[in-house]
Image (tube, rainbow, N blue to C red):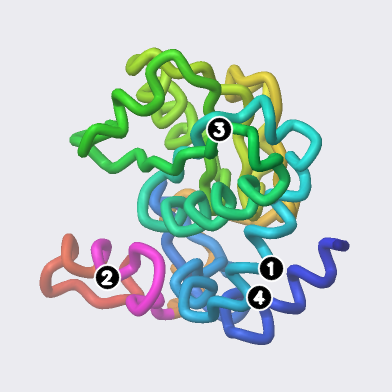
Amino acid sequence: MTESVILRGLENVGALRTDGHFVFPSGRHSDTFVDMDRVHAFPLLMNTVANELASRFARDAGNIQVVVGVDRGGITLGHNVARLLNRFGGDEDPQIMAGMAEKDGSGFALLHGYDKDVAGRKVLVVVDIVMSGDSVRSAVTAVKACGGNVVAVAAMANREGTTADQLGIPRLECLLNLKLHSWDPPCKLCTQRVPLNTDIGHGRRVMSSLGAGTEESA
């Protein structure tokens, strides 16, 4: 499946926004945003994304024992990838498990017994979007701290051209390689007094921190 097919799917459900002033989790501003909540709202699109990711590992399914989804965006995607990967194995193969890494303070943790599930096992880590790589590295560290062996990371999109070497992992598979412009605030959109989008991204958090300030002052 080509990148254009995935991009068209995102555009059709309003998940790819190119018409605003958005705030990324890092605090940087951009005129483009990928809204994973819209992907989650359309199960067929989510299944398409998960199926394409799973197919990248079809030949390696026997080398994956647990799929760990990261944070809200990656947990649903990871569970679907695990479900589909199980179809590639024979009836005699052990079932590939699904787990999750959740926010825990400034990093991630495997709670609810998932720490025991990954111990001594080969793990595929799934995220929705790779950005600066900090969150991915934190999730990988959490898996390793529980005794898991991270064999790869899979993502729907790579926003900044991050590489496997930069993440300290053997393999990185991404369906989309998006080169989105982003800037430290105040950015050119701030200068142009384009209002921050407070419906998606982290614009609402920024506006709350400004108190009585205006959107344009962000």
Residue shown at the point (86%, 62%) measured from the top left: 1
Q: CA distance from mark 1 to mark 3?
A: 25 Å
Element type where label 4 sits in the image: helix
The residue under label 3 is 94
Closer to us: mark 3 or mark 4?
3
Instruction: Based on the picture, tell me whether residue 202 belongs to the magenta stretch.
Output: yes
Q: CA distance from mark 1 to mark 4?
A: 11 Å
Can you say whether 141 is above or below 196 in the image? above
Camera-nearest residue between 126 and 177: 126
Q: CA distance from mark 3 to mark 4?
A: 34 Å
- Magenta region's main secondary structure? loop
Question: Which mark is first along the chain, 2 or 3?
Answer: 3
The magenta stretch spans which residues? 195-206
The residue under label 4 is 10
Closer to us: mark 4 or mark 2?
4
Question: Which mark is first along the chain, 2 or 4?
Answer: 4
Element type where label 1 sits in the image: helix
Residue 30: x, y in percent? 54, 62
Residue 187: x, y in percent? 49, 59
Amino acid of disc 1: Thr
